[in-house]
Structures are given as structure tokens and as C-alpha cells.
Image (spheres, rainbow, N blue to C red):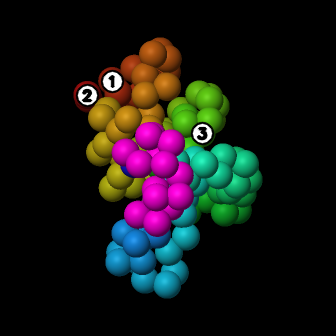
Amino acid sequence: MALGYAGKHAEAETAFRRQGLMRDGASWEPGPPELVLMGREREARELMRRITNPVERFAGRQMDLARGLAMTGDTSGALAALERAVENHEPQAVWIHSDPRLASVRSDPRYRQLLAKLGL
């Protein structure tokens, strides 16, 4: 993530790809947050539109969607995805309070309501 935040998009892509291939093998594809940090925001937005489609909603991707939406300024969409991630008990939801990619939604009262619902 640090490479992407530093604007080193090509290096970030190389690092994400290496990590993804080690974790998921040949099936790895970047999610919305990785795409944004690789400087590919337009692709991230398109992927988020597809994931938002209820037919394509599946466990494990709502946190990615929330991160991508938050990183591209869609607070309402990000909060809705966070709600779904929590409802679906996605493992990545444990990072809701500390993930820097969600920083843009933290000042919204709906975010605080979600934290309260989680007992945080």
C-alpha cells in the first residue's frame, strides 16, 4: 500500500501482483483498492459497479468494494458495502476501524453508527 500512496504505481502493481500470486496463485486479480493504488482508478470504478450488482455479490468482496468506494469518494456506497461486509461476517471486517483505505468515511455519522452496532 505504501508504494501506491507514494504515487509509485508501477512498483505498487508489481508488489500487489507478487503478493496476490503467492496467496491465490494464477487466479489472483486486483480488487478495487489495489487498482486505485496502482493508478487505475477508472478500472476500479468499473469493477466496483460490477461487484455492486446484487447478482454478483459474494462473500469476501464487500470489504474490497467498501475500500475502493471510500478511496474514490463514494461515502454512501462505501458505508453500504461496509454494512454488507459486517452482515456477511467477512473476515476483513475486523479492520473496519483501522484500515487507512477507509479514512474518508470515518467522519460520517453512519460510520459511527456502524461501529456502535459492532460494539466498537
Q: Is residue 84 left or right of residue 47?
A: left
Q: Is residue 119 left or right of residue 115?
A: left
| Residue found at the very far bottom of the displayed protein | 26
Q: Which residue is mark 3?
A: 69
Whole-angstrom CA distance, mark 3 to mark 2, is 22 Å
Q: Which mark is residue 116?
A: 1
Image quadrant in which the C terminus is located: top left
Q: Secondary structure at mark 2?
A: loop
Would you say the residues marked 1 and 2 are in contact, meaning their CB atoms lie under 8 Å apart? yes
Whole-angstrom CA distance, mark 1 to mark 3, is 22 Å
| Residue 96 percent across, percent down from the top left | 36, 38
Residue 84 visible to the viewer: no
Q: Earlier in the sequence, mark 3 or mark 2?
A: 3
Q: Residues within 10 Å of mark 2 (few under 14, many from 20)?
A: few
Give the residue type at disc 2: Leu
| Residue 62 percent across, percent down from the top left | 52, 51
